[in-house]
Amino acid sequence: MDAALTEAVAERVGEGTSPSLQLDGFRGSLDLLLSLARAQRIDLARLSVPDLVTQLAAALERAGGEITLGQKGTWVVMAAWLVWLRSRLLLPAGPVDKEADAEGDQLRERLLALQQAQALAGWLERRPQLGRDVFARGQPEFTALLGDAGPVVAERHEVDVVEFLWAGLALFDDTPKPTTTAPPYRPPWLDLYSVVEARDRIRHVLSEASDPTPMQRLLPPDDGAGEGEGPPRSPLRLRSGWAGTLIACLELAKQGEVATAQDGSFAPILVSRIPAAEPAGRNHGDADGRNGSSPG
């Protein structure tokens, strides 16, 4: 390669902004190599892709935090372009493969997306950084520089002497504070039918009934059975009577005192009392007493 041409291209692309490479037939920066490859001024067939990747990885590792993330991404994009140009020499001459063409389009789209991400990363790096260019409220610049040492000059607070004296006198004021005479809040009383009342009524009604009893007959007398005297209660009392009776029936059925049955949907619910079983020991003692025998 002509030395004069190399120097001219180096001046145009800005040699020194990318890592230096030493490959077979080339020695210089990465951006210079890419510019020569695009201008077809270098034989890419002699380019060793493994050596290129190895030297680029070593350069990225040596750069560390001295080089920005956007610049490192630019190096990777340039190396990807070189690998893509080198791979075109390996393809046989012939009709264009549709799948390969589609893969090439995808690669170009990814490279364009990477370039856009690099541009966005550069824009973010140029923005004012918190703690370096701008500072949060309550954190002046000298505080950030000193670290844990804190500010050197303490802040001054202006005190109103008159207001301070009035506040001090208020501490010695013996005037009793006005007491609140408003009556305390009490929730309104609701005439509800409790579950305890429903349970006691169910036990009382079933103790006198021999057949299964509809649940409607287990309601309180003034809530639908027509047995009570005086005007009927409020609609809330009626609803609480049904709800309390149903809950009490379920509770007694769970305890094994009553049994419930229903023939079909929306049919009356029948409630019957389950007689308590007598202990076995008591029956055995009665039989022994009648027979006149003793345990011995």
Image (tube, rainbow, N blue to C red):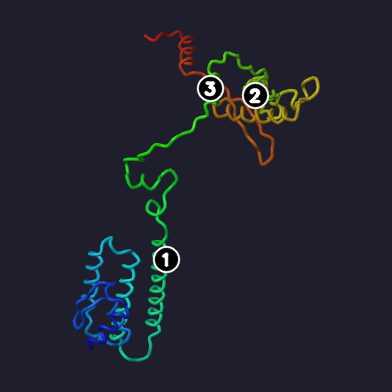
Q: Using the image, determine if residue 84 lies above or below residue 180.
A: below
Return the disc, 1 or 2, that comes first in the chain's sequence.
1
Q: Is residue 6 left or right of residue 190?
A: left
Residue 117: x and y in percent read: 40, 67
Return the disc, 3 or 2, that comes first in the chain's sequence.
3
In this orientation, which residue lies closer to the viewer: 58 or 272?
58
Q: Using the image, determine if residue 266 lies above or below residue 295.
A: below
Indicate which disc residue 17 carries: none
Q: Quadrant of residue 31?
A: bottom left
| Mark 2 neighbour density, 10 Å: few (under 14) some (14–19) many (20 or more) | some
Residue at numbered disc 1: 120
What kind of residue is marked 1? Leu
Q: Nearer the viewer, mark 1 or mark 2?
A: 1
Q: Nearer the viewer, mark 3 or mark 2?
A: 3
Tell me the SS state at disc 2.
Answer: loop
Q: Mark 2 and mark 1 in contact (Cβ < 8 Å)?
A: no
Q: Quadrant of residue 181?
A: top right
What kind of residue is marked 3? Leu
Residue at numbered disc 2: 194
Q: Using the image, determine if residue 294 lies above or below residue 280.
A: above
The residue most toward the front is 161
Q: Residues under labels 3 and 1: Cα distance?
A: 60 Å
The quarter of the image holding the N terminus is bottom left
For the point 28% across and 62% down, the residue is 66
Q: Residues under labels 3 and 2: Cα distance?
A: 62 Å
Residue at numbered disc 3: 165
